[in-house]
Amino acid sequence: MKRPFPSRRSFLTTGATGLGGVAVGAAASALLFDDHASTPAADLVTGLGTTAVATPFPHQAGISVPARQQSHGTVVAFDLVATASAGQLKTLMKAWTAAIADLTAGRVPAGSSEATDTTALGSGPCSLTITVGFGPSLFGKAGVSPDARPPELAPLPAFGTEQLDAARSDGDLGVVIAADDALVVFHALRTLTRAAAGTATPRWIMSGFSRAPGSSPDAASTSRNLMGQLDGTNNPTPAQPGFEGKIYVAADAPTAWLRGGSYLVFRRIRMLLDSWDAQTTAEQERVIGRHKDTGAPLSGGTEHTPVNLSGQNPDGSLAIRGDAHIRLAAAASNGGATILRRGLSYDDGLKPDGQPDAGLLFLAWQADPNHGFIPVQQHLTRSMDALNRFTTHETSALFAMVPAPAADGYLGQALLEPRSA
Amino acid sequence: MKRPFPSRRSFLTTGATGLGGVAVGAAASALLFDDHASTPAADLVTGLGTTAVATPFPHQAGISVPARQQSHGTVVAFDLVATASAGQLKTLMKAWTAAIADLTAGRVPAGSSEATDTTALGSGPCSLTITVGFGPSLFGKAGVSPDARPPELAPLPAFGTEQLDAARSDGDLGVVIAADDALVVFHALRTLTRAAAGTATPRWIMSGFSRAPGSSPDAASTSRNLMGQLDGTNNPTPAQPGFEGKIYVAADAPTAWLRGGSYLVFRRIRMLLDSWDAQTTAEQERVIGRHKDTGAPLSGGTEHTPVNLSGQNPDGSLAIRGDAHIRLAAAASNGGATILRRGLSYDDGLKPDGQPDAGLLFLAWQADPNHGFIPVQQHLTRSMDALNRFTTHETSALFAMVPAPAADGYLGQALLEPRSA
């Protein structure tokens, strides 16, 4: 059969077209092009489609790498079927490990072919990342000992003001899929779902978006959420001291199978946009504690100026109000608790009452939720965060996102085969 | 207040950054930069963010312009409130006309400011188009005479196999919003919704996606749907003889207010992906009549080779089966009936039964639905299109999409002020 367009593999390895022109780093080249070792890395010029994200061992990709949130993401939870055995769970994790290696490199997954698996054919990897973890409810199923569950993976406590939908919360397995093309994300979702058939089925699926690459002239600029705020200004960055220890489980942590992993708290946060839009801009800025257009804190400066929580207005009042969101969420207000925030906006149309079913898919990454999301959210609810009036936490999930698999291993192996760890 | 990033307007007019590097055509420059007439058009180098789509008078943008479907789209229907007057409806259409001119040029809408309307601040127009029309149910409301409804705008007949959800079908006003950034689409949706407050409220909203620019090395290549098929290969193009007359209402058509407009049939078509994936690739190809990977018709050739409906296999059987989708949908099988198809894939997670709530937001544009969608769909259902087993039409709407507004006029003016037409 004639092929008027290149295969996914040939597209990746010959890809000199596309937008932008970003050279793949040597590490990524070595990972992806090991069967084309003669290709000089400098010749591998990539763009939106051809960009592949290398695994930042010992971590999975999709947490702090890539630095920029891709423009599309799907978060999916799977539940094991009642009959799933320990062997089936291991087989599934091996299958996902192999599929993820292929998909994130832009290859048709092994066991399939370009004639049959065509949904993303013609598209490059588009910075696809797929990040896998285990929920509290996995422990006690399919041969996973209840005793293996680390104390940090206890179900989250109840928080004031949340209105959780149990059917769209929690799950045995959690997967975050993100890329700069929605079709590539969907194809990955379908591939993982098919691979799970007979062992696990999707419990819930939610999808969202962030700014498209190239939409803004400043690629490094902070993206905005549906309330119009710059969202993520104060995120920790890997260049900051202590980042690794706050976001990733330490190499000497007691839970051996999770060393190099991270805890993900996932919340679907509905925004009450009609109420929000009815506020004056000045009131919206007081609720958050930042200027809406520039993102600068109300205590002065520009977007990235450190927040001065004791700064005062000329009349002596606090520049950042007592119930302002950034005051209550600040690490300084929470004993240094830190999270790495990723966010995807969602627009799911209308609620039955005609109000927007829209908001934020909120992902908080941390080495320990007890020193991350939990104290921050407890503080926000107990101290009556002004933002609470305009948001509703609708769903919640906690997953222990495992480390990257060893070169010849698979995701979660150190838990599922503890003797080999 | 310091501005660490450019305003939407300055971004547009100074935009020399961004991906790609596509020069805005002279027509677009004249339209968009009339207040910066000294800027040479050749200096206006644009990319994904900075690309603005000019109105192709007498048509609205978003039908056959731009040629490439943008990567994100939202289709929204509004119903007038019961008390809406003729004056309110005119005021709304004037407000939408002004907002659309601003939004599609990347400007903050008049009456707002960059301090308050920040959701898309920092993003360019991203090829935003907004296309507006009237549904059958508008006639008889808000001073619009029932007698003004053209016969072509009669509600669609019932089709076999459809399972329509009335609450997510039809509507007084229909709007299609599309751009290469989902946040820009959402911002436009909110802007139009706020402008309608007190006159019309959203009846339903659906969103979908197509391939991101740069995802594929061949920017002109056909996009794929969630079944993995190339979708839209046989679309008519403006370069073909008779295109204008088949897609747009003629300049001498009896319905004076719609001259230059087009009829939109919108269907939410769910794909039964688990059933589809259970078929062999050969059977999938027989259902459609094309090869899955290349899109070439089973009668031979490559993707764009004309389909030979009488072509035979070596054993004498028809190469394209009697119930194949492309046979039954072909213009040759429907008295020459032609539609311009646009499609957006949607992934709305899971249905209550755990099956994918995913498929195609199908937009069919034509000068007359009686010579477009209606006969084709009747033929597809009566002749037992093989694809019917794998799809369900869940919602339906028909809108008369009005011509572009005159330079100092507004959308729908020729209907709402017939004496001035």
Image: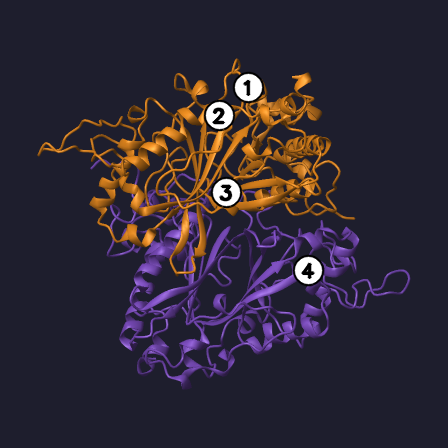
Chain colours: A orange, B purple
Q: CA distance from mark 3 to mark 2?
A: 18 Å
* Numbered disc 1: secondary structure: loop
Residue B57 in percent (x, y) is at 42, 66
Quadrant of the drawing holding the N terminus of chain B: top left
| Residue hosting label 1 | A255
Hey, what amino acid is under mark 4?
Phe
Q: Residue at x 73, y 63 (%)?
A: B307
- Residue for badge 3: A169
Up the image or down, A63 lies above or below A3; here it is above
Residue named by callout 2? A152
Badge 2 element? helix
**Mark 3 or mark 2, which has the lower sequence index?**
2
Determine whether, in the image, residue B366 is placed left or right of residue B149: right
Instruction: Give the alpha-carbon distance from disc 3 to disc 4, as whole Å.
Output: 30 Å
Q: CA distance from mark 1 to mark 3?
A: 25 Å
Question: How far apart are labels 2 and 4 at the CA level?
Answer: 45 Å
Q: CA distance from mark 4 to mark 1?
A: 47 Å
Q: Secondary structure at mark 3?
A: loop
Are the residues at dot 3 and dot 2 in contact (C-beta closer than 8 Å)?
no
The correct choice, above or below, for B31 with respect to A165 in the image is below
CB under 8 Å between discs 2 and 1 = yes
